[in-house]
Image (cartoon, rainbow, N blue to C red):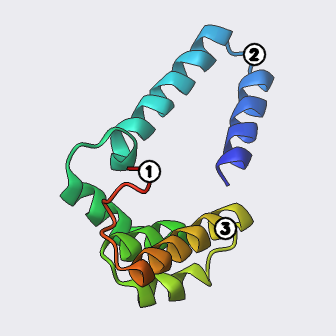
Amino acid sequence: MIWLLLHVFALVMGYLQVPIWFMYGVLAVMSIFFLIRNPLVFGKDPEKMMAYLKKSKAQHLQFLYHFLNRDLSAAEHGMGKIRSKKAKQVSELALKGTERIRKSKRSPCENEWT
């Protein structure tokens, strides 16, 4: 959806023959707005990040919320709803790694190589 809006924006700006510096300025303001609005990019407050993950409608972010709260059954259920192949593979690997650690009865923070 965002790509469609960007293309329509570029088409309108080109049709109106807007100066290039204005287009770059609008793009910079939109980028800064996105970075400020999204707490996952440069956020420092974990409660805000978890609240953002909880309210998110993106299935991968919902998976991350349940995974980070160690609700693995809900995370596994949410993983089935992820449409992106890459995000689904990353989610499966995270769950498999967690199961492997659980079976070996090691601490998740323990380093494998020491």
> Residue under circle 3?
89
Q: In this orientation, which residue lies closer to the viewer: 37 or 61?
A: 61
State which tag comes first along the sequence, 3 or 1. 3
- Residue 85 position, x and y percent, is 73, 67
- Residue 8 position, x and y percent, is 74, 40
**As drawn, 62 above or below 12:** below
Q: Residue at x 40, y 42 (%)?
A: 41
Three-letter amino acid code at the position of disc 2: Gln
When asked about the image quadrant of residue 33, the answer is top left
Disc sitting over residue 17 in the figure = 2
- Residue 47 position, x and y percent, is 19, 59
- For the residues labelled 1 and 2, the Cα–Cα distance comes to 60 Å
Q: Is residue 28 left or right of residue 40?
A: right
Q: Is residue 93 left or right of residue 56?
A: right
**SS under mark 3:** helix
Position of the N terminus, as image quadrant, is bottom right
Frontmost of labels 3 and 2 is 3
Sort mark 3 into few (<14), some (14-19) or many (20+) by Cα contacts within 10 Å.
Answer: few
Frontmost of labels 1 and 2 is 1
**SS under mark 2:** loop
Three-letter amino acid code at the position of disc 1: Trp
**SS under mark 1:** loop
Three-letter amino acid code at the position of disc 3: Gln
Q: Residue at x 44, y 40 (%)?
A: 34
- For the residues labelled 3 and 1, the Cα–Cα distance comes to 25 Å
Disc sitting over residue 113 in the figure = 1
Q: Residue furthest front?
A: 114
Disc sitting over residue 40 in the figure = none
Q: Residue at x 43, y 57 (%)?
A: 112
Q: Are marks 3 and 2 in contact (CB under 8 Å)?
A: no
State which tag comes first along the sequence, 3 or 2. 2
